[in-house]
Amino acid sequence: METTRQEQLRTAGLRVTRPRLSVLQVLAERPHADVDAIVTAARALHPTLSPQAVYGVLEALVSGGLARRIEPAGAPALFELRVGDNHHHLVCRSCGAVADVDCTVGAAPCLTPSDTAGFVVDEAEVVFWGLCRECRVGTPAGTAQVDQHDNRGGASG
Ligand SMILES: [Zn+2]
Ligand SMILES: [Zn+2]
């Protein structure tokens, strides 16, 4: 499995370089990372790497089809290696956690809009917004009070 990253780069027509391998490794370890997180992690692997170099590598990986950029509204762009399967994302409004969602029925029904307006559609991106489990558990709003009716001796007669 160690050689696959190099093969991936070659298959995409990209030269195999240390920075590219480092960024691929970072993306493999942290799916849906934003650029800042990727720069920090890549520089930990490869201290001479400049942020500009990391940006350049990300651009090359995205345009080479090895990485995917997702851009939830109002959030920084996120990068992942899971490409080509047209999966979608759940994004937490509170903490920004991101989870993958597969297209559930057959072959990407989301690629069939009711009206394509003459477009040839090759990708659909759906972002489901909500609160992740941890943020839901953390909210004190759900303090359910159990109403205990005391029915002892209620019935007369
Ligand atoms: Zn959350
Ligand atoms: Zn994803």
Image (tube, helix red, strand yellow):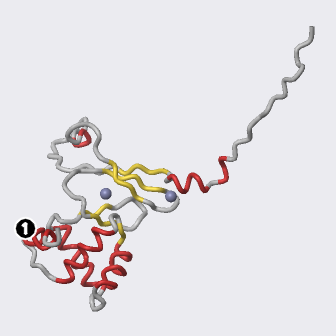
Identify the residue position indicated by label 1 in the image.
11
* Residue sticking out furthest to the bottom: 48
Task: Determine the image quadrant of residue 99.
Answer: bottom left
Q: Secondary structure at mark 1?
A: helix
The amino acid at mark 1 is Thr
Q: Which residue is depicted at the point 27% across and 84% down?
A: 52
Looking at the rendered image, the quarter that the C terminus falls into is top right
Q: Is residue 152 left or right of residue 91?
A: right
Residue 111, placed above or below residue 45: above
Q: Which residue is depicted at the point 36% across and 68% down?
A: 33
Q: Give the image location of residue 26, x and y in percent.
A: 29, 74
Q: Which residue is depicted at the point 39% across and 68% down?
A: 76
Q: Give the image location of residue 80, x and y in percent.
A: 28, 64
* Residue sticking out furthest to the right: 157
Residue 43, placed above or below residue 102: below
Q: Give the image location of residue 43, x and y in percent.
A: 32, 85
Q: Give the image location of residue 94, x and y in percent.
A: 52, 59
Residue 37, placed above or below residue 112: below
Of the pair 53 and 9, the residue shown nearer to us:
9
Looking at the rendered image, the quarter that the N terminus falls into is bottom left
Q: Is residue 79 left or right of residue 151?
A: left
Of the pair 137 and 92, the residue shown nearer to us:
137
Of the pair 96 and 118, the residue shown nearer to us:
96
Q: Is residue 23 left or right of residue 141?
A: left
Q: Which residue is depicted at the point 70% across and 42% down?
A: 144
Q: How many marks?
A: 1
Q: Label 1: few (<14), some or many (≥20) within 10 Å?
A: few
Of the pair 121 and 80, the residue shown nearer to us:
80
